[in-house]
Image: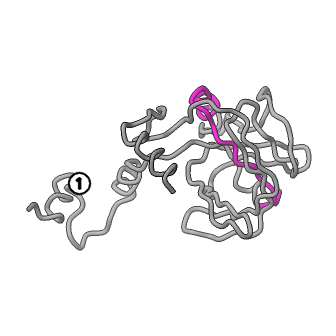
């Protein structure tokens, strides 16, 4: 049986026992975790903003809570801090360009909503037209975690708006979801329960 420590060292020579782990190794390792893709939007007064995010997860069913992690240097970060509301727009495979638009990082680029079709639900945070689903949230807690802020929002509105395939992200690339043979047996198990 291979030694797990030596296998890790082969994959990442810089992962030497006792040595500090680099941010690059951590990023590459986390890139092996497949995620969905969202655009988190917010509204502060007349300003509308959005940013691509895959650090999103459900937290609780009672109360309904979701979290999103936002880099403190992101241009949307300060607006989220002031606004107190946000929407998580879950993107479909057909929305790769939407994700790219809101993922850009440059001083010349703004993450405003100009030219992006959208509507509003409960909080006034923009809901992107054509997204698969959305969660409309009021921020209830902000935690500081290193170079990110973890925004926890109470979900006050939600909707499923499309049955299209989801957009997924893996190792720095966009892709889609394909049914596997295991999916047919999962349906059989659910029917038996």
The single residue placed furthest to the left in the displayed view is: 1
Which residue is depicted at the point 78% across and 40% down?
A: 127
Which of the pair 22/121 is nearer the observer? 121
Which stretch did the figure color magenta?
A: 81-100
Foreground residue among 146 and 171:
171
The residue under label 1 is: 12
Residue 193 lies in the magenta-colored region: no
Residue 25 place in picture, x, y as percent? 33, 55
**Residue 155 pos. (x, y %):** 76, 58
* Quadrant for the N terminus in the image: bottom left
122 and 85: which is toward the camera: 122
Q: Where, by quadrant of the figure, is residue 7 drawn?
A: bottom left
Q: How many marks?
A: 1
Q: Is residue 31 above or below residue 137?
A: above
Q: Is residue 147 left or right of residue 116?
A: left
Instruction: Identify the residue at horizontal 48%, vertical 40% (top origin).
Output: 169
């Amino acid at each position: 049986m291979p030694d797990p420590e030596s296998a890790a060292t082969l994959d990442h020579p810089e992962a030497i026992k006792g040595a500090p782990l680099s941010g690059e190794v951590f990023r590459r390792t986390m890139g092996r975790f497949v995620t969905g893709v969202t655009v988190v939007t917010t509204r502060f007064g007349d300003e509308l903003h959005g940013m691509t995010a895959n650090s999103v997860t459900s937290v609780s069913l009672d109360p309904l809570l979701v979290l999103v992690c936002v880099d403190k240097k992101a241009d949307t970060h300060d607006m989220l801090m002031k606004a107190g509301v946000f929407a998580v727009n879950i993107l479909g495979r057909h929305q790769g360009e939407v994700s790219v638009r809101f993922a850009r990082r440059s001083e010349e680029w703004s993450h405003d909503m100009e030219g992006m079709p959208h509507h509003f639900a409960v909080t006034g945070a923009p809901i992107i037209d054509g997204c698969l689903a959305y969660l409309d949230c009021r921020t209830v807690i902000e935690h500081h975690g290193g170079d990110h802020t973890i925004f926890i929002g109470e979900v006050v509105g939600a909707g499923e708006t499309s049955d299209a395939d989801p957009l997924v992200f893996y190792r720095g690339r966009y892709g889609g979801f394909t049914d596997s043979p295991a999916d047919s047996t999962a349906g059989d198990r659910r029917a038996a329960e």
